[in-house]
Image: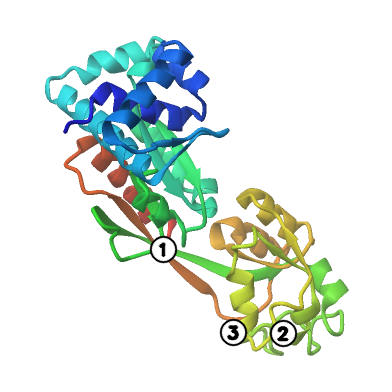
């Protein structure tokens, strides 16, 4: 049995675009033709391939076909590049024929997306006819998008390669507990530096080895309900992480702004807090920094384009991450 490539690409378009109508516009077909192609493929394989919801979702069997279609599109691009035809495709894409660009779905955590990730992709897009379909998730969960075939590559905290993937280290993202001086004045035990609730500093000014006890009842900021950085920091200090009231701010820059505005305390990486710490607009609360190692995982394909993405990301990470 063979999987007709045009039918596989049609299914991938439906999943990428979210609806049959949008896929029809992309493929320059009628919606009924797109629907018929998908039904034909389902009949040939004897499997339901798409959940006809809004947005449309691939079933487990459909995800296998979508992954095949994406792999073929990537390999087709690389084959054309071998013939020097990618330059023609690039010229057409720049002239407006965006359908000639190869689409690469990637997964990335919010803090990387908000800081160092996009400049690397911009350099790749300048050199190749490519568009990126980014999926944002916590670094502990992005590897699952690789396993399902949703993405071709992912920034992840998982060092063990996903089946069928390659892995390379990117660096360390270091987080520290910080808050504004005004927040300390409102919520610390004594409301002033130098007392038992001095924001995690000893009398000599060194950062304390644990978060101060008063944080157990002070407001904090969480990214979302899967964000465990603040939770783990409180637990490491012997404090009950469930007692503290919390704000949920599910965007990296907005999360950092919420902390900088004094809404609560939070764990911020250096490139979102260093300038404010230097100006005294933020202060360290104490406790050990939390180091989150990041890795790049991608499909194990011999693809110059995917390798170019990986190299650009690794290069950017070397200059940004620890």
Of labels 2 and 1, earlier in sequence is 1
Is 198 located above or below residue 180 in the figure?
Answer: below
- The residue that label 2 is drawn on is 212
- Distance from label 2 to label 1 (Cα)? 28 Å
Q: Position of residue 252 (x, y in %)?
A: 61, 52
Asked if the residues shown at circle 1 and circle 3 are in contact, with their CB atoms under 8 angstroms apart, the answer is no
Q: Where is residue 211 in the image (x, y as percent from the top left)?
A: 67, 82
Q: In which quarter of the image is the C terminus?
A: bottom left
Rendering quarter of residue 49 = top left
Q: Is residue 237 left or right of residue 82?
A: right
Disc 3 to disc 2, C-alpha distance: 11 Å
Asked if one can make out residue 127 in the rendered structure from this viewpoint, the answer is no
Vertical placement of 140 versus 231: above or below? above
Q: What residue is disc 3 on?
A: 236
Left or right: 290 as drawn, with respect to 244: left
- The residue at which mark 1 appears reads as 157
Q: Which residue is drawn at 37% across and 64% down?
A: 158
Rendered residue at 74%/79% (across/down): 199
**Real-space CA distance between mark 1 and mark 3, rounded to the nearest whole angstrom:** 20 Å
- Which is closer to the viewer, label 3 or label 2? 3
């Amino acid at each position: 049995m063979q999987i007709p490539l045009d039918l596989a690409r049609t299914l991938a378009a439906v999943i990428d675009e979210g609806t049959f109508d949008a896929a029809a516009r992309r493929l320059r077909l009628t919606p009924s033709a797109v629907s018929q192609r998908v039904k034909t493929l389902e009949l040939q394989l004897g499997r339901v391939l798409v959940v006809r919801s809004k947005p449309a979702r691939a079933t487990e069997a459909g995800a296998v076909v979508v992954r095949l279609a994406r792999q073929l599109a990537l390999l087709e691009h690389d084959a054309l590049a071998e013939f020097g035809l990618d330059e023609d495709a690039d010229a057409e894409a720049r002239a407006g024929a965006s359908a000639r660009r190869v689409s690469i779905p990637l997964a990335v955590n919010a803090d990387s997306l908000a800081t160092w990730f996009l400049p690397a992709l911009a350099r790749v897009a300048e050199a190749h006819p490519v568009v990126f379909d980014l999926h944002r998730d916590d670094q502990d969960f992005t590897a699952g998008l690789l396993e399902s075939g949703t993405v071709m590559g992912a920034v992840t905290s998982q060092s063990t390669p996903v089946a069928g993937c390659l892995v390379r280290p990117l660096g360390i993202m270091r987080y520290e507990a910080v808050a504004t001086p005004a927040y300390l004045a409102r919520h610390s035990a004594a409301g002033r530096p130098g007392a038992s609730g001095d924001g995690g500093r000893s009398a000599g000014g060194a950062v304390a080895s644990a978060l101060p006890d008063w944080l157990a009842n002070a407001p904090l900021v969480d990214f979302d309900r899967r964000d465990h950085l603040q939770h783990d920091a409180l637990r490491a200090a012997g404090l009950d992480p469930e007692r503290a009231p919390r704000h949920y701010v599910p965007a990296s820059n907005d999360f950092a702004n919420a902390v900088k505005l004094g809404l609560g305390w939070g764990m911020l990486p250096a490139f979102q807090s260093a300038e404010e710490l230097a100006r005294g607009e933020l202060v360290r609360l104490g406790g050990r920094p939390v180091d989150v190692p990041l890795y790049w995982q991608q499909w194990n394909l011999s693809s110059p384009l995917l390798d170019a993405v990986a190299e650009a990301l690794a290069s950017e990470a070397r200059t940004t991450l620890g």
